[in-house]
Amino acid sequence: MANIELPRKILVSRKALDETVNFCKELHLKGSCLVITGEHTKEVAGKRVFSDFQNNGFLSNIQIIKDESDIPELLEKINAFDFLIGVGGGKIIDITKYISNKANMPFISIPTSPSHDGFASPRASLNLNGFKSSFEAKPPLMIIADLDIISQAPARLIASGYGDVIAKLTSVADWKLSNIKTGEPYLSYAADLGLSAAQKILDDPEHIKSDIKFLVDSLINCGISMCFTKSSRPASGSEHMFSHALDMLYPEKKSLHGEQCGIGTIIMSYLHGQDYKKIRKCLEIIGCPTNAKQLEIPEEIMIKALVKAKEINPSRYTILNQIEINESKAKNILKTVKVI
């Protein structure tokens, strides 16, 4: 446990943003900070965070970024600062996390939407090589999740976050399977952090879908589970491999990570022998897509993604290692679970 890096401060509440500067002082953070945000999230919270630090004795600056193409410029600038603050959605936080890891510099995570568990995890998912890849990073020093801000996120982003939590039903099943088949260590306390939340959503989606605090807490717990294992194993299995295959095969898509993982969970739960119909119904109630048409991804891409999924992370044993899937079989599977 001594070598496990975890966030030092986590606050999930209304008006949480008010406490950011005080928490930094409690952690003895000093000097200058760079607030990294997006064009939209600057107006939502970025400008306020910058102003709060500037008015409380911190030398601060603000950088508006669009995507991964801004990383080289950021890497050139960050040596002038002592810590970073990422204010935004998943991409903004992942970029901040990535460059903080490169510079061995602490960062604060301030999510403005709950679309997936990246704002708390020690991994960064970025498109740096023409397709999306997962990179090792450090967890945030602090997570400030202001529910007044997050609750105003578009409904689709909120539903996507639930999809990413639901995915733990199959990622943990894959992990258990790997433990049996390969002897890979399985840590139940880490697995249960995300799995228990996924099970609660599955059992009562109608009531839980409006509980933003539960969603944010669940996403943070999923991130913490990855800190314990120093890998994405408890939170990412065959359903994420399917999602990453979609990223590679259809980069022009407009679907969200959590939406794709939700559909991946329907497919992989069927292969695991879980109640995939209940999972599909749960996602429908939450407002997540459950088929290719809703994702706006061609059926042939979905078929190819299911065939390719096993290749995404060959070192990770999942249910896909148990089944030989060609295009014909993939098509039958996707029709059975009504994804196509």
Image (tube, helix red, strand yellow):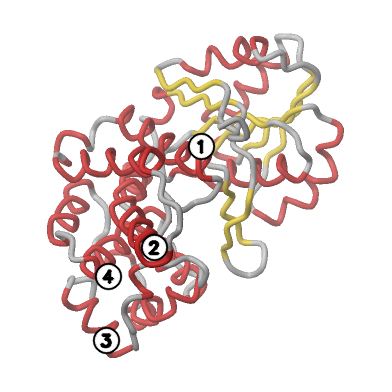
For label 2, the SS is helix
Mark linked to residue 293: 4
Disc 2 marks which residue? Answer: 178
Q: Would residue 265 be found to the left or right of residue 31 on screen?
A: left
Disc 3 marks which residue? Answer: 329
Three-letter amino acid code of the residue under disc 4 = Lys
- Binning the other alpha carbons within 10 Å of mark 1 as few (below 14), some (14 to 19) or many (20 upward) gives many
Q: Residue at x 71, y 13 (%)?
A: 28
For label 1, the SS is helix
Q: Earlier in the sequence, mark 3 or mark 2?
A: 2
- Binning the other alpha carbons within 10 Å of mark 3 as few (below 14), some (14 to 19) or many (20 upward) gives some
Q: Earlier in the sequence, mark 1 or mark 2?
A: 1
Above or below, 71 against 214 in this view is below
Q: Nearer the viewer, residue 270 or 73?
A: 270
Three-letter amino acid code of the residue under disc 2 = Ser
Real-space Cα distance between discs 4 and 2?
Answer: 33 Å
Which x, y percent locates residue 324?
34, 84
Can residue 89 be seen in the rendering of this structure?
Answer: no
Which x, y percent locates residue 59?
80, 19
Q: Residue at x 51, y 37 (%)?
A: 120
> Do the CB atoms of the residues marked 4 and 2 lie less than 8 Å apart?
no
Q: Residue at x 44, y 37 (%)?
A: 113
Q: Quick one: quadrant of the N terminus?
A: top right
Q: Residue at x 45, y 23 (%)?
A: 146
Mark linked to residue 120: 1
Above or below, 134 against 226 in this view is below
